[in-house]
Image (spheres, rainbow, N blue to C red):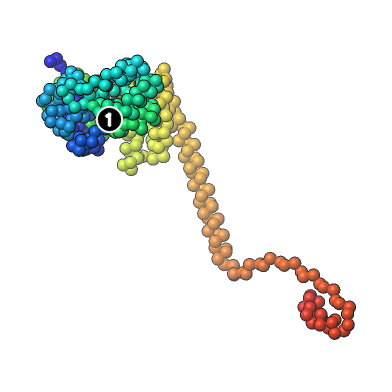
Amino acid sequence: MGYQSLYRQWRPETFADVVGQDSIVKTLENSLKSNRISHAYLFTGPRGTGKTSVARILAKGLNCKSGPTASPCGTCDECLGIKNGTSLNVIEIDGASNRGIDDVRELRSQVQFTPINARYKVYIIDEVHMLTNEAFNALLKTLEEPPAHIVFIFATTDPHRLPATILSRVQRYDFVKFSEQATVERMRVVAENEKIEIEAEALRLIAQHAAGGMRDALSILEKCAAFAEKVTEQAVVEVLGVAPQEQVDLFAKHLETDSKSEALQIIDDLYNQGRDLAHFAAAVVARLRQDILAGVSQDELRAILAIEQLTETIREMRFASDPRIVLELAVLKITTTTLGVANADVSELEDKVRGLEEKISKLQAQLAKQPNREPERPSTPEPRKQRIPSANDEERSSFLLENWTDYLK
């Protein structure tokens, strides 16, 4: 067999080999042990997080001669066939190139056939979100009433593009990005076994650039190993075309200290060296964030505003014909208009707050010195004086006695 790339050589073959997806692995292992097999699974998550690899391991567990089992032997005909991609019972389909209704109709005509010397016929559809609406509608009938020997495993990076009718009929598992530490540890194991000499800082830089994708990390490691006998941080910088960490740190410092000329000079140098300015800006954001979290930022307000501006700039750089200009404009906004106005506003607000606090204290002191006064009662309308009867003297005297207070007013 010819040479295989590192990410293919080190693709996990058992659940024990899978790193960074512990909850998913545990759930699938328990399902296999208890023989509670769903007819359809949906594996979602960023690229390079192990969706297709776990799908193949699940297929092995279903069709291994000792299965269903959470620990496939890896040596039986079905396990070897799945590993080599020659199994007639595990069909892998690229959803991007087989996305039409005719492709799904052909699939529906095949699912009725029972597996050959195996328990299940497993269909792994990668990038399933690329199927057309008509194709999804055609697939829906099979998902509603699947044959007992059929298991679908869908993989996608965009689950929101799947119809709700499909999502409601699958068991969904969300794969997460690998942490920087997990990526470094995995690459260290691979490097030791492949006899690749590599520095710790080089591993860290590769993990940062891979951004949580193990496949990307191993591909970069392989490229760096071909570039230099000993993989140093500088070698990784040259291979990736990224800025050295020293320039990232210096640039972040210039933003916090309002040194726009020096910051613009770094951008010009990186551009002339052919460095990736978008990745450089992302590295600066990461550095500013670390400084804030560690409490060592020279000016926390400036750092926060710089992160906000650079994050927006990174999005704009994707569509810019000259990303250098976009980044330079961001530097000017951060070091002149944005931060100056922000500091002035904050200073003005602080003065106003102090003034209000002093006024409130004075009013409270004045109120404390004044004696307590009963609240004024609302005035009541004066009672209407009644007419004195003009009857005999006895009645007149009786009336005056009863209403004498009104006549004294």
Of residues 398 and 18, which is closer to you in this image?
398
The x, y position of residue 160, in whole percent, is 38, 29
Of residues 383 and 61, which is closer to you in this image?
61
Q: Residue at x 35, y 40 (%)?
A: 292
Quadrant in the picture for residue 88 = top left
Residue at the outermost left position: 75
Q: Residues within 10 Å of mark 1 (few under 14, many from 20)?
A: many
Q: How many marks?
A: 1
Q: Residue at x 51, y 45 (%)?
A: 349
The x, y position of residue 21, in whole percent, is 24, 34
Q: Residue at x 33, y 38 (%)?
A: 291
Screen quadrant of the C terminus: bottom right
Screen quadrant of the N terminus: top left
Identify the amino acid type marked 1.
His
The x, y position of residue 115, in whole percent, is 20, 22
Instruction: For residue 165, say whether it is visible.
Output: yes
Vertical placement of residue 68 versus 273, above or below: below
Instruction: For residue 185, say whether it is visible.
Output: no
Residue at the outermost bottom position: 394
| Residue of label 1 | 39
Of residues 357 and 384, which is closer to you in this image?
384
On screen, residue 394 versus residue 223, left or right, reads right
Quadrant in the picture for residue 382 = bottom right
Q: Residue at x 29, y 27 (%)?
A: 146
Mark 1: secondary structure: loop
Of residues 132 and 141, which is closer to you in this image?
141
Quadrant in the picture for residue 215 = top left
The x, y position of residue 266, in whole percent, is 35, 25
On screen, residue 292 versus residue 31, left or right, reads right
